[in-house]
Image (spheres, rainbow, N blue to C red):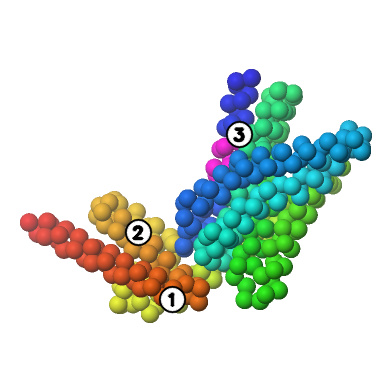
Amino acid sequence: MLPILFVALIAAILPTSLYVLLIWWLDRYEREPVMLLATSFLWGAIPAILIALVVELAMAVPLGLLLQPEHANTVGTVLVSPVVEELAKALALVGLVLLFRPEIDDLLDGIVYGALIGAGFAMTENFFYFISVGLESGWSGLAATVLLRSVVFGLSHALFTGITGVGVALAVQSPRPGWRWLAAPAALLLAMFIHFWHNFTLSATGSNALAFALTLVADWGGVLTLLAIAMLALRTEKRWVRQHLASEVPRALSPEHYRLVQTQWQRLGRVSGWLRGVGLQKAALQAQLHHTAMELAFCKQRRLRTLPTEQEALQAEIATLRAHLADLDQRLQQMSAA
């Protein structure tokens, strides 16, 4: 029992950690607050699972009375689970909109939050699946299940809730009333349908090779589509940064900083160089300056929904950080001369 429990835990956590890093990496310019990202993940991992489990167990009672056991299990897996689980996961997105609406700037933010909720849900669900299969089928059955659920279909729940996140982001950002009311419910229904298709082709049709291939096409086609949307959103964010920070040069940003904030890899490379050659203090100040500049750019983008004082506070913070950097450079030069 203990070896299976340990392997199930590692097999659930390790791939999920890699997927979470991938999702986090996508959000390159204005990264979302760590606490919100962690809360989204944990919602999927614990409350959403519990809500779905309670509702699905409650639904199993009438299904068991109306249908034969094998039919009741199929209906529960194929029809009930997609609806219940997607609704349970979507509650976190509703909470984000109600409590932290300004944090959802574009479609990328919706994808990031939705995918993290789905990743948390998948991790916990996989853990219990792995224990069950390991106890029933042994190590060979456990290995096959880990391969399918953590690798082949490891991003499925992230895909489902990521779709809902796109709809929520559209609803938040669209100036059209029709989109604001229809985008999120339509995306949720699409997520439920793809989840239904995933469950249907894997369980209701048995081990049919064509059904398995159709599941792969639907899941990975959806993942690649979300990735394409994320890449387009990144291009848009880069344009926002270039456009909104241009007017801050040279008053708030130096030309060098303006160039660096537009390219993620250059920013990371420069910070790494400072860590090796200049010191932690300057690297930390520089990273904070770039982060604040990003906040300013995105604040300007949503300026119709924010107070002007927020922009002024960010501009003042950038000026303070530049002064600290200049003072640090001067002290370093004096030390070198001495």
Residue contact between numbered discs 3 and 2, judged by CB atoms under 8 Å: no
In the rendered image, which quarter contains the N terminus?
A: top right
Residue hosting label 2: 287
Secondary structure mostly seen in magenta is helix
- Residue 113: percent from the left, percent from the top? 58, 55
Image disc number at residue 11: 3
Instruction: Give yes or no for residue 13 being in the magenta stretch.
Output: yes
Q: Nearer the viewer, residue 12 or 217?
A: 12
Residue contact between numbered discs 1 and 2, judged by CB atoms under 8 Å: no
Q: Residues within 10 Å of mark 3 (few under 14, many from 20)?
A: many
Q: Quadrant of residue 127?
A: top right
Instruction: Give yes or no for residue 257 being in the magenta stretch.
Output: no
Distance Cα–Cα, label 3 vs label 2: 35 Å
- Please, what is the three-letter code of the amino acid marked with disc 2? Ala
- Residue 184: percent from the left, percent from the top? 68, 63
Residue hosting label 1: 244
- Please, what is the three-letter code of the amino acid marked with disc 3? Ala
Read off the magenta span: 12-21
